[in-house]
């Protein structure tokens, strides 16, 4: 089992990088049909006539996949107490069927909670890259993380 | 079929309100197991011992459901050319099994694109409410919308 990380491990400037995940055409269609059924996300024929030049993944799909990669790497597993919000989400380039994406995290702010000193408030810059090294999405997320238990 | 809306219909101050959707325990568990498998989203036993006092929906689930409600109401259907991003996402209160949520949209900015005058750039405030009239999530999203075709 991976070693648990706590608030104290999230020092400003520290970076984490997840392994990748490939989004198939079927997954893109399934996700969009459930959550974002716009023509350029669910209809191969319509999307080929669209400005995007073919099917593209819902931005919510890229977002959920990015977060799942981070949870799967166990970066937050022990310490996470949830998140109050996210800022500056930008979908920079389309994600297409067969693209493989990876998530990079960088700690950009970290401070102890004033009201609850057993935890800290960490802001992380998420950057999602495709297999060509192009940035496809970025955002800033706030995460509440437990401090390392004393024992 | 509902009447199509175009950029010109999204005047600052205009509001839209969707019908509601109920998130079941099974749906909350399924979504979280796929996208956000943290203990307070996937484990009834662990979540009962957590600070949130029981199972809560992933914030990404609330987010995706809010957007799906908007697409389902056909508010953007004809005009949407996608979104470059979102800002100021705040998860204000937990969403629990059996809660019914609704999305309210308010146009807070609208302008014609400088570079592509066939479309406009609209910023909308999303507010998601539960069945007790409590706000559970809010965000600001930018949407690119086609102008009304001439004919």
Image (spheres, coloured by chain):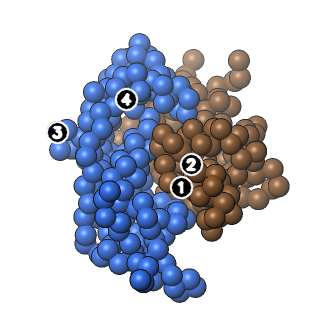
Chain colours: A blue, B brown
Judging from the image, what secondary structure is the residue with disc 2 in?
helix
Sequence-earlier tag: 4 or 3: 4
Residue position marked by numbered label 2 in the rendering: B42
Q: Secondary structure at mark 4?
A: loop
Which residue corresponds to mark 1?
A: B39
Contact? badges 2 and 3 (CB < 8 Å): no
Q: Which residue is mark 4?
A: A56
Question: Contact, CB < 8 Å: mark 2 with mark 1?
Answer: yes
Residue occupying the point 25% across, 70% down: A14
Camera-side residue of B76 and A104: A104
The crowding category of the residue bearing disc 4, from other C-alpha atoms within 10 Å (few below 14, some 14 to 19, many at least 20), is: many
The answer to which of B5 and A121 lies nearer the viewer is: A121
Point 25% across, 72% down: residue: A13
Q: Which mark is residue A145?
A: none
Q: Nearer the viewer, residue A129 or B123?
A: A129
CA distance separating discs 2 and 1: 5 Å
Q: Residues within 10 Å of mark 1 (few under 14, many from 20)?
A: many
* Closer mark to the observer between disc 2 and disc 4: 2
Label 3: which residue? A132
């Amino acid at each position: 089992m991976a070693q648990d990380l706590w608030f104290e491990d999230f020092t400003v400037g520290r970076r984490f990088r997840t392994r990748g995940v490939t989004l198939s055409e079927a997954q893109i269609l399934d996700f969009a049909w459930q959550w974002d059924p716009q023509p350029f996300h669910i209809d191969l024929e319509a999307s080929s006539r669209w400005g995007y030049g073919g099917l593209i993944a819902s931005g919510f799909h890229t977002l959920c996949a990015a977060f799942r990669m981070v949870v799967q790497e166990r970066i937050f597993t022990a310490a996470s107490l949830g998140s109050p919000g996210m800022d500056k989400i930008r979908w920079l380039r389309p994600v297409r069927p067969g693209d493989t994406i990876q998530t990079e995290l960088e700690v950009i702010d970290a401070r102890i909670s004033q009201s609850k000193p057993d935890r800290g408030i960490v802001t992380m810059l998420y950057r999602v890259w495709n297999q060509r090294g192009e940035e496809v999405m970025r955002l800033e997320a706030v995460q509440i993380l437990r401090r390392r238990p004393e024992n």
